[in-house]
Amino acid sequence: NEYSLAGKMISVSIVHGGPGPNFLSKDLVSYISGQSSFNSSVEEIKDEVIGTVLKEILNASSLENLQDQMLKNSTMLQTAGCFRNVTSVQEKHSVVREYLRWYIIERHHSAIERFKEGLNCLQFLTALQQHPAVMAPLLCHLDKQLSAMDIEHLFKPDLSETGSNKRNQEEKTISFWADCLLDCEENSSGATLEDILMFATGVPSIPPAGLEPLPQLQFLVDSKFPMANTCANILKLPLADSYNTFKENMTFGIRNSPGFGCI
C-alpha cells in the first residue's frame, strides 16, 4: 500500500499545481508510461559489488575472459535470468543490459504495479501514457539547478510611482537583489537559491504548473530583515544603503527562518 499511496501523493501534488518528484529514473518512467526504450548504464547502480561485477564483464577483452567472468558470477546472473553460454565477446553488452533491466524494472514488478495504481488517481497515469514527452519530465530526475535568472524572472517587483524618492530606493534594492541572487548561485553567500524560494513561497523548487498567485517583490521600510507571505507568494525586501548590508541582512533573515518543518 505504501507504493500506491506514494503514487497518489505524486498525482495529487502535480494535478493541483504542486511540485513533481523529479527523482525517478528515466527508464522507470519510460516503462510506467508504456515506452519501450531502456538506456540505463552501470554507473546508475549504487551497489558497489554489483557495479564492480558488471564493469568487469564489460571490460572483458576476450571470449575466454568473458566466459570466466560469467562463470565466476553465475549465481548473480542466474538470479536475473541472464546466465548463459556466450559464444562471442560482444555478447557482454546484451548480458549487462539484460541484468540492468532486471535490476531496475523486473525485480520490482509488483511494487511498480502498485505505484501505477496510485498514479492513476485523478487520471494522471492516463495523461502520462497519452503524452509521455510532456508529462515524463515531471517525474524524472533533473540535473538542472535553479539559476539566479530563474528566480529574478519569477518575482515581479511592486514599484512605487516613477520619479518618486521611494522608487529610487526600490530600484537600488532591485539591483542589490539581482547581485545577491548571483552570489547565491555562485555559492558565495550563506543562503542558496532554494533557501530563498522556500522562504518566499514554501517550496524549494518551481512547480511544473508554476506558482499561483504569481510571486511578487515588495519593499520594507521598517525592518532590516526580509519578510514573506508564503500564502500570497510575496517576498518583502529590506531597503539598505549598501550591498554588503543588504546581503548580510538577507542571509541572516533567510537562514534563521523556521523552514516549515521540512526535514
Image (cartoon, rainbow, N blue to C red):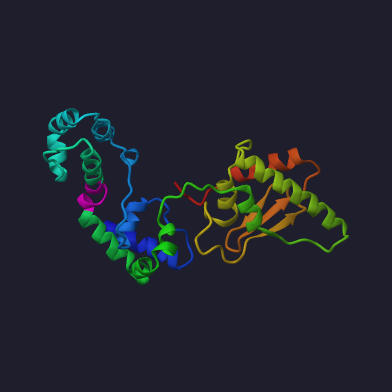
Determine the residue positioned at 19% across, 28% down: 65
Q: Position of residue 205 (x, y in %)?
A: 52, 53
Determine the residue positioned at 47% across, 46% down: 143
Q: Main secondary structure of the magenta part?
A: helix
Q: Relative to 98, does residue 236 appear above or below in the rendering?
A: below
The magenta region covers 101-108
Where on the picture, by quarter, is residue 37? bottom left
Residue 250 appears in the picture as rendered:
no
Q: Position of residue 86 (x, y in %)?
A: 14, 38
Determine the residue positioned at 85% across, 62% down: 162
Tell me the quadrant of the picture where the N terminus can be found.
bottom left
**Front in this rendered view, residue 53 or 68:** 68
Q: Relative to 29, does residue 241 appear above or below in the rendering?
A: above
Where on the picture, by quarter, is residue 180? top right
**Front in this rendered view, residue 43 or 67:** 67
Residue 16 appears in the picture as rendered:
yes
Q: Position of residue 152 (x, y in %)?
A: 66, 53
Say whether residue 203 is left or right of residue 38: right
